[in-house]
Amino acid sequence: MRRIFCLILLAALLCVPVFGMAADNVISQNDRGDNVALVQQRLRDLGYLNYRPTGKFSELTIAAVQSFQQQNGIAPDGQIGSDTYNLLFSDGAKRAPASAGIKRISGPAYNGSVKTHGTLGAWEAISALIPEGSDIAVTDYNSGTTYTMQRTGGVNCAQVVPKTTTDYAAYLASFGGDATWEHRSVLVTIGETVYAASMFGMPTGGDDNGTGMKGHTFLSFNPGRTDIFGLSDEESLVAITKAAGE
């Protein structure tokens, strides 16, 4: 994700528009590079891909693009032209619909053990309190399960990994025992303050950090935005406001 952020920053410094494409600029089958990886990550965030970005526009990516286009009212040619690109990276992009053929794993429902709610603190202020390398105490709002995550990066939300194998087991238990696309309402204790937040159940990225998790996952605070152009993540926001008691 750092690489993507650096790419966006470099483009800004060079006065090159990142958000938007020229009408004759198309990303299509067998193309490679950072632009393809960025598209794949956004498709993954919206539920159209279930594997991490590779940077190669393969047949699986084409099928995901076609699904996105069909769901969003664009002719499904499987290519990323300006219309598809601009809608893909907009707040109006529709998520992939739930498939009846896919088993949806969901963590425990609210059991009443957590009686308090978190503060809706602003992400910019919270980010300064948890620099990279910080340990973060997390409590699952529904079940009361607690575990520790460590921040490894993130711009609009915190990229986090479990601190230990025990923390990873507790993280998985809060999501029903396996990776899932669910966003869980959580409470995060930083100093004397408890903040409302959202934890994502689908890790992404590289190698096992020694705890069992492949790559990292995302811990989001108010207002619930992604690292892909800072777009609004409505599912995270729902989880955050629930943790705040709203």
Image (cartoon, helix red, strand yellow):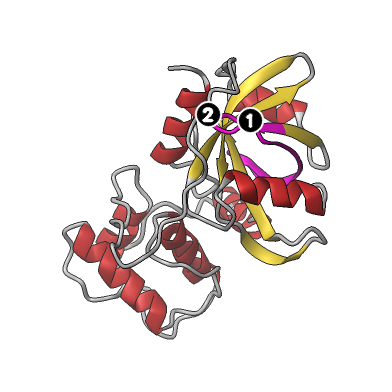
Disc sitting over residue 144 in the figure? 1
> If the image is split into quadrants, where does the C terminus sit?
top left
Residue at 60% across / 43% down in the picture?
Answer: 174
Magenta includes 135? no
Q: Amino acid at mark 2?
A: Asn
For residue 228, say whether it is visible: yes
Report whether 17 appears left or right of 9.
Answer: left
Above or below, 2 relative to 244: below
Q: Is residue 56 above or below residue 244?
A: below
Which residue is drawn at the image coordinates 21% and 56% (left, top)? 72
- SS at circle 2: loop
Residue 164 percent location from the top left of the image: 82, 50
Q: Amino acid at mark 1?
A: Gly
Tag 1's secondary structure?
A: loop
Q: Classify the position of the N terminus by image quarter.
A: bottom right
Judge by depth and name the residue closer to the eye, 12 or 51. Answer: 51
Mark 2 vs 1, N-terminal side: 2
Q: Residue at x 34, y 56 (%)?
A: 88
Secondary structure, magenta segment, majority class: strand
In the image, taking residue 157 as reference, residue 240 lies left or right, namely: left
Magenta span includes 149: yes
The residue to which callout 2 is attached is 111
Q: What segment is highlighted magenta in the picture?
A: 138-162
